[in-house]
Image (cartoon, grey):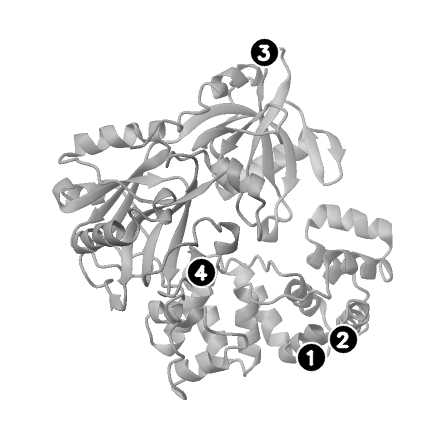
């Protein structure tokens, strides 16, 4: 457990991706089995301990820590695990149990036994060890390590390509003995996932000026960039179908209308959307369907889903990923005509249309008009590009339309998490109604520099006028220019509106709050994406 705690502590203090990568590689090379496997599981959200819930940790803390001290400290720190770890009475005994022992014990523990187990371990750990233990059991480490970065570290440790890790990942189970045996050169490569397994998705780079100078519009296929979620359709040829989200999670249960009626073995890439007649509805409508294991018939009828395909990876047994995009697109069109057109799936699966553009002026006009058809901008895919998992440079580009902007007034502030837990960094903004009331339209917690965050934090503390638990109410004086991707209806906001992906573009220290935007200006931006895209 000590080595795991040291890893988490070092990862938090390492701001750069390269530094985090080196720490992970060193850990995977030096930590013993099976501890390094359980550390990998913790970093990639592969652990779950049903016997331990945050409420149980709060109750346990109340048996050792003064409740007033705990409440004041928790409000300041903003993180349950950190607060308990710092306030837990020390015993003077620092004995770190092995990580695998803790995992094995908690995996078998009953809910009523878990508090005593945690208390026993925390009595023998130092504050860093207690924090690591509590983060382990509650999940959400917040140390700046994504599953992709962890897999990249594994690849570097074993001297293999990260795409090879992705190919086998979803067939593995913690503590990953076969995986580490292969990477250490002591065993064979674990078998790749079968026909229904997940294949690493190919991702695009944001188009910049240098890319534009080096790229000819005649060398790329042009498509709309859809505002849904990226998915991979996998069929094994017997009627079994899976729908994988971008990270590889299987989400077919939430979209039963998509995963029925397909018999041919295929793996295809596309965008999951909701709407009728293949007309994309706002992303907020799709959110109603996400993370539901068994959606009701009423929900499906209210927000019917459809799949818009734009690439094919496997056609039957044939792996097409090494072929040029132009060839794959032709194969996709042939597969669709032969296997989908005229079948029940025809009403819920279509193809992303190809767009005609031969100059950058043509492309710019298309991009600027993308909001009118429910798209975020354009995708530019080199006609000669192979399908390579990850984000290869120079193959696919996304050229999103310029974001919308509005000036909004800061209303509420909360502390952040992790390295931001001592700063007020999560902000709620509002715009004015005609009657003069300021009503919330969204939350933003990025877009500013560290120096700007420090100044914002000072301003919030100096201008707080009320408090509701961890939320500070501030004087209605500070204006920020928000950038956002759209406006949608929302019953959760008093304004009836919510900004899509808001972020702080500029802090308007100079602008009076009375000159911030009004709700009717945002009302004019609702529904721009409801036109027929075909």
Q: Is residue 61 above or below residue 404?
A: below
State the separation of the CA atoms marked 1 and 2: 9 Å
Q: Nearer the viewer, mark 2 or mark 4?
A: 4
**Residue placed most toward the observer, 332 or 20:** 332
What is the x, y in percent for residue 217? 15, 40
Quarter of the image for the C terminus: give it.
top left
Q: Residue at x 43, y 67 (%)?
A: 151
Residue 248, numbered circle = 4
Q: Is residue 401 above or below residue 323?
A: above
Residue 319, numbered circle = none
Residue 434, numbered circle = 3
Task: Check if mark 1's residue and mark 4's residue have beta carbons within 8 Å.
Answer: no
| Callout 4: SS | loop
State the separation of the CA atoms marked 1 and 4: 33 Å
Task: Check if mark 3's residue and mark 2's residue have beta carbons within 8 Å.
Answer: no
State the separation of the CA atoms marked 3 and 2: 61 Å
What is the x, y in percent for residue 498? 54, 30
- In the displayed structure image, the side of residue 420 where residue 338 appears, left or right: left
Q: Residue furthest bottom?
A: 186
State the separation of the CA atoms marked 2 and 4: 38 Å
- Sequence-earlier tag: 1 or 2: 1
Task: Check if mark 4's residue and mark 3's residue have beta carbons within 8 Å.
Answer: no
| Callout 1: SS | loop
Q: Nearer the viewer, mark 1 or mark 4?
A: 4
Residue 97, numbered circle = 1
Q: Residue furthest top?
A: 435
Let me know if residue 234 appears in the view.
Answer: yes
Residue 124, numbered circle = 2
- Sequence-earlier tag: 4 or 3: 4
**Residue placed most toward the observer, 434 or 341:** 341
Q: Nearer the viewer, mark 4 or mark 3?
A: 4
């Amino acid at each position: 457990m000590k080595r795991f705690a040291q890893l988490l502590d070092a990862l938090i203090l390492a701001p750069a991706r390269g530094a985090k990568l080196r720490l992970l590689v060193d850990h995977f090379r030096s930590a013993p089995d099976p501890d390094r496997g359980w550390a990998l599981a913790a970093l990639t959200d592969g652990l779950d301990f049903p016997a331990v819930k945050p409420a149980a940790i709060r109750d346990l803390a109340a048996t050792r820590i003064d409740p007033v001290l705990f409440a004041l400290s928790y409000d300041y720190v903003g993180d349950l695990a950190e607060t308990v770890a710092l306030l837990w009475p020390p015993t003077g005994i620092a004995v770190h149990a092995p990580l695998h022992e803790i995992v094995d014990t908690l995996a078998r523990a009953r809910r009523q036994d878990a508090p005593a187990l945690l208390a026993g371990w925390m009595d023998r750990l130092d504050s860093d060890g207690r924090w690591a233990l509590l983060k382990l059991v509650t999940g959400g480490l917040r140390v700046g390590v994504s599953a992709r970065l962890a897999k990249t570290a594994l690849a570097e440790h074993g001297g293999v390509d990260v795409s090879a890790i992705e190919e086998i990942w979803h067939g593995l189970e913690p503590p990953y003995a076969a995986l580490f045996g292969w990477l250490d050169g002591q065993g064979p490569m674990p078998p790749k996932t079968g026909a229904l397994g997940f294949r690493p998705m190919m991702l695009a780079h944001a188009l910049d000026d240098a890319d534009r100078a080096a790229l000819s519009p005649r060398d790329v296929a042009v498509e709309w960039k859809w505002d849904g979620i990226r998915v991979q359709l996998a069929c094994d040829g017997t009627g079994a179908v899976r729908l994988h989200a971008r990270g590889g999670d299987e989400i077919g249960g939430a979209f039963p209308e998509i995963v029925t009626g397909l018999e041919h073995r295929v793996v295809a890439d596309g965008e999951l959307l909701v709407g009728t007649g293949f007309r994309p509805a706002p992303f907020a409508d799709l959110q109603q369907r996400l993370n539901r294991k068994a959606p009701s018939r009423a929900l499906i009828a209210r927000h019917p889903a459809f799949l818009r395909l734009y690439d094919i990876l496997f056609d039957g047994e044939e792996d097409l990923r090494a072929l040029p995009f132009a060839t794959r697109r032709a194969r996709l069109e042939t597969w669709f005509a032969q296997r989908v057109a005229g079948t029940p799936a025809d009403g819920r699966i279509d193809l992303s249309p190809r767009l005609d553009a031969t100059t950058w002026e043509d492309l710019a006009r298309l991009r600027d008009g993308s909001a009118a058809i429910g798209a975020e901008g354009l995708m530019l895919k080199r006609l000669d590009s192979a399908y390579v998992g990850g984000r290869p440079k120079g193959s696919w580009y996304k050229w999103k339309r310029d974001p919308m902007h509005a000036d909004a007034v800061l209303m509420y502030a909360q502390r952040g998490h992790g390295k931001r837990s001592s700063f007020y960094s999560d902000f709620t903004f509002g715009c004015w109604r005609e009657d003069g009331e300021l009503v919330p339209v969204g939350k933003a917690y990025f877009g500013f520099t560290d120096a700007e965050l420090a100044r914002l934090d000072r301003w919030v503390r100096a201008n707080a006028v009320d408090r509701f638990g961890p939320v500070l109410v501030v004087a209605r004086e500070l204006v920020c220019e928000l950038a956002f991707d759209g406006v949608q209806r929302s019953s959760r906001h008093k304004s009836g509106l919510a900004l899509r992906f808001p972020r702080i573009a500029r802090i308007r220290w100079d602008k009076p709050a009375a000159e911030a935007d009004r709700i009717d200006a945002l009302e004019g931006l609702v529904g721009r994406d409801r036109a027929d895209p075909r």
